[in-house]
Amino acid sequence: MSVRVLLVDDQILMRSGLRKLLEIEDGIEIVADVGSGPDALAVVPTCFPDVALVDARMPGMDGIELITELARSHPDIASIVLTTFDEDEYLFGALKAGARGFLLKDASPEELVAAIHRAAAGGTVLSDHVAGRVVAQLRGEAPAQPVLSSREAEVARLVGAGASNREIAAELYITEGTVKNHVSSTLRKLGLRDRTQLALHVISAPGAFPPLC
């Protein structure tokens, strides 16, 4: 039997891409795709998914809130977080809420398909990038120092140079919304309050934010 999958992501292009990617896979059936947590809860009683593939950051009800409610009202559904952001608050928040997996959106199609089948069978799936943090947490070890992605480091470097979000977006060929997300993620990882603190942090440690080649 095919694994019935519900896609939940507020970005329509992401949902459409995931649908097209997964629809061609044997053993997977996309039963619905929606753009919010409330919409997901509304369709679950009629589409009966085995697995919910959930974005972590969504307006209104975020992925962790949705997974919490799914675990309470539909415990047979295996939830997997699929996100761009690998912050501890999302990783451990999702697992505590009842998620069966946590994957980053740079996962390969093969990894994603394997994760869906494993979660549907009752297993747990973690990206290699975050698995070590989970093991360290279970062992009671001190958390590792925050690691910025190459894109976060580049955005931070441009913030330190005084560039606006619009200028950064133009420089890196990304949207202003994506720039804002990278800035917010970097602030959380580094424990900084605002953009000014980030700029000062970059200026004080320029070697940590080299330009991309």
Image (cartoon, rainbow, N blue to C red):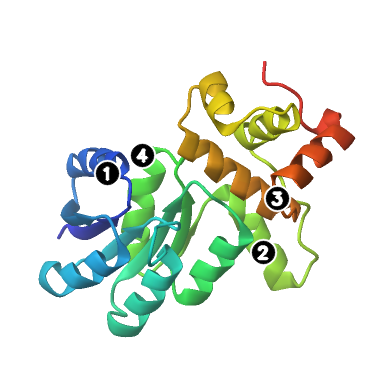
Disc 4: which residue: 109
Badge 3 marks a residue whose secondary structure is loop
Question: Amino acid under label 1?
Answer: Ile
What is the CA distance from the residue labelled 3 to the residue labelled 4? 36 Å
Residue 51 drawn above or below residue 35: below
Badge 4 marks a residue whose secondary structure is helix
Which quadrant of the rendered structure holds the N terminus? bottom left
Question: Amino acid under label 4?
Answer: Pro
Residue 53 point in image, percent of width and height: 33, 57
Query: Around disc 2, counting alpha carbons within 10 Å, would you say few (fewer than 14), some (14 to 19), or many (20 or more)?
Result: few
What number is the disc on residue 194? 3
Disc 2: which residue: 135
Question: Amino acid under label 2?
Answer: Val
What is the CA distance from the residue labelled 2 to the residue labelled 1? 34 Å
Residue 50 is at least partly visible in this image: no
Which of pointers 1 and 4 lies earlier in the amino acid sequence? Answer: 1
What is the CA distance from the residue labelled 2 to the residue labelled 4? 25 Å
Question: Amino acid under label 3?
Answer: Asp
Which one is in front in this view, the residue at disc 3 or the one at disc 4? 3
Residue 167 is at least partly visible in this image: yes
